[in-house]
Amino acid sequence: GAVVSQHPSRVICKSGTSVKIECRSLDFQATTMFWYRQFPKQSLMLMATSNEGSKATYEQGVEKDKFLINHASLTLSTLTVTSAHPEDSSFYICSARDHGGRGAPETQYFGPGTRLLVL
Amino acid sequence: QKEVEQNSGPLSVPEGAIASLNCTYSDRVSQSFFWYRQYSGKSPELIMSIYSNGDKEDGRFTAQLNKASQYVSLLIRDSQPSDSATYLCAVNFMDSSYKLIFGSGTRLLVRP
């Protein structure tokens, strides 16, 4: 149980284009999903909290107009990196909170991640 | 001071030994604690969660929590080379809704 998928797993794009990443909870409903970014040899950095049916909450320093988040259903959240630039190249990982699961409601299950390379 | 601190390592142990990974957290009201394992190039995987003081065992893994000392640890018994990874400690503080605050991780290397 508590499986989270991400698509695509890897994407290469040209500078200036937009990239959409999907995060799905496969066997549970997730009212809250989280988007993280991780640069090589660094820890996870929380970018934003995605809430189903409402606006995402962004962490300090994260541009909401650049990283668009939509959480239209209980099983799907999307992150769109708009006008991507080489410095946006990173490992983007989503997680989902299984509020109906056996564990604590704060338990997060991670997707496999999306590796973005902007040329 | 960081909210969740871990020694970056690497912690090197021989195969079959006990690996002890430590994590301290700031003086804020906290309610749940998690250990995640992250292999190189992969996303984190939940290993254990613990909510109350004491020990919690699951197979070769034991999580220990001491709220008075603001300390949580993970013991791995009979360490295997496949346990070599980065271990992330995460804390949920009550005033941060459902967010988890992650430490920077400890890299564990189990030598064959």
Image (cartoon, coloured by chain):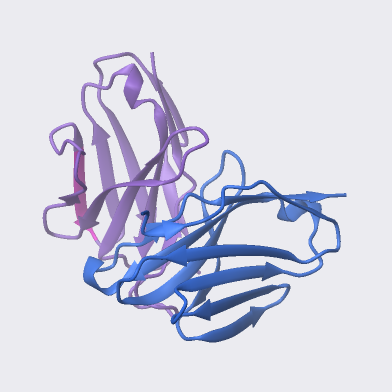
Q: Is residue B14 magenta?
A: no
Q: Which chain is blue?
A: B
Residue positioned 41% across, 31% down in the render: A90
Residue A27: quarter of image: bottom left
Query: What residue sits 86% from the left and 63% below the top?
Result: B16
Q: Specify whether residue B26 is in view.
A: yes
Q: Main secondary structure of the magenta part?
A: strand
Identify the chain drawn in purple: A
Q: Nearer the viewer, residue A101 or B3?
A: B3
Depth check: give the residue in front, A97 or A78.
A97
Name the residue at 23% across, 54% down: A50
Which residue: 35% across, 49% down? A23
State which region is magenta: A68-73
Q: Quadrant of residue B64?
A: bottom right
Q: Is residue A71 magenta?
A: yes
Q: Quadrant of the N terminus of chain B?
A: bottom left
Vertical placement of residue B33 versus A58, above or below: below
